[in-house]
Image: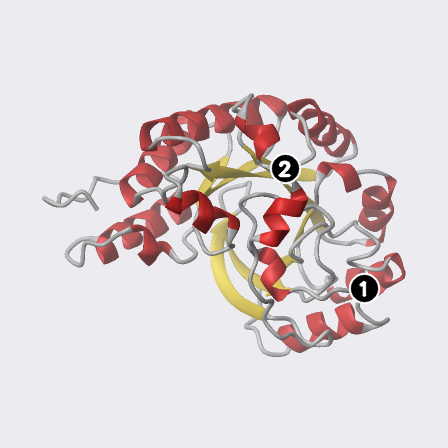
Amino acid sequence: MDGRWIRSMRGEKSPVDPYLPYGWFNEQEPGLSGELNEVSAILLTNRECPYACLMCDLWKHTTSETVPAGAIPAQISYALERLSPASFLKLFNSGSFFDPRAIPVEEHARIAALASDFDSLLVESRTAFVGELCLDFNRMLSAQLQVAIGLETVHPELLPRLNKGMSLDDFRKSVDFLKENGISTRAFILLRPPFLSEEEGVEWACRSIDYAFACGVDVCSVIPVRSGNGALDHLETEGYFRQPSIPSLEQVLEYGIGLNKGLVFADLWDLERFSTCGNCKMSRQDRLQKMNLRQEILPRINCACSA
């Protein structure tokens, strides 16, 4: 799957304002030392990622050009004024924080100042942008920096088909670079990307967690793949993709937490779309949320459905 075909499957973007984030919310998340952190998360509006990954739907809330000077700090300030106090700040920008066309380098100092009241700051980046800019930005911070990288899958045939433009060696080298410079890392891992059965999806998500921790990441976040970006909808009609079930997400989270090698979270965004059972859906979601927060395996939900 190449970028031209993937882009041709897309619909229209949502209208966005370059001076406003397209989302913000508070949540809780355990820290690396076991403490429970209050988190402020901001979904920044910025230029579309130059890569077109097969499973990505983040392009929907992006601009076609680099945002104007001062726009990113203005977005962060706007959201922080509306969010509850927190110790952990997450900045998601639908691509790579260290891509100068997405987040202008000239804005880094102002962003660091806005993060000065936080103990930790998470940003996301592709391996292609992990380098000296990370270190320069880290030196501006009083907060502990964590960089999230999309590992996605260690399946040797599937990873290239996702159009990531990244190898497993690229991922390992980026984690090594960040670790050597005192920067924490988080891996995004996909549950059931296209071309895998439900059982294979679980197996390769677990293998990907193994690889991420072997590379030295501190946190793994498991993301169930959802349709809605055009390309996946087409593959779904052709029989090459199906959304995973909640029990599969439960199984992978249990596996990751059971390793006791680092923090493992299940991404609960839009979780209701992965279950059709009205009897157990909310109970399963509550269980996953508690497992995320406690980092312990809780008793399974008993239900006659297949979820």
For residue 179, side relative to residue 31 (left or right): right
**In front: mark 1 or mark 2?**
2
In this view, the residue in front, 133 or 239, is: 239
155 sits to left or right of 129: left
Q: Is residue 150 above or below residue 144?
A: above
Residue drawn at (79%, 68%), measured in percent from left and top?
67
Q: Secondary structure at mark 2?
A: loop
**How much space separates mark 1 and mark 2, taking CA atoms?**
23 Å
Q: Position of residue 60 (x, y in %)?
A: 59, 63
What residue lies at 79% left-to-right and 65% top-to-bottom?
Answer: 65
Please report whichever mark, 1 or 2, sits nearer to the chain's N-terminal start. 1
Q: How is the image coloured?
A: secondary structure
Q: Which residue is mark 2?
A: 163
Left or right of residue 232: residue 278: left
* Residue 66 disc label: 1
Q: Which kind of residue does numbered mark 1 sit on?
A: Thr
Label total for image: 2
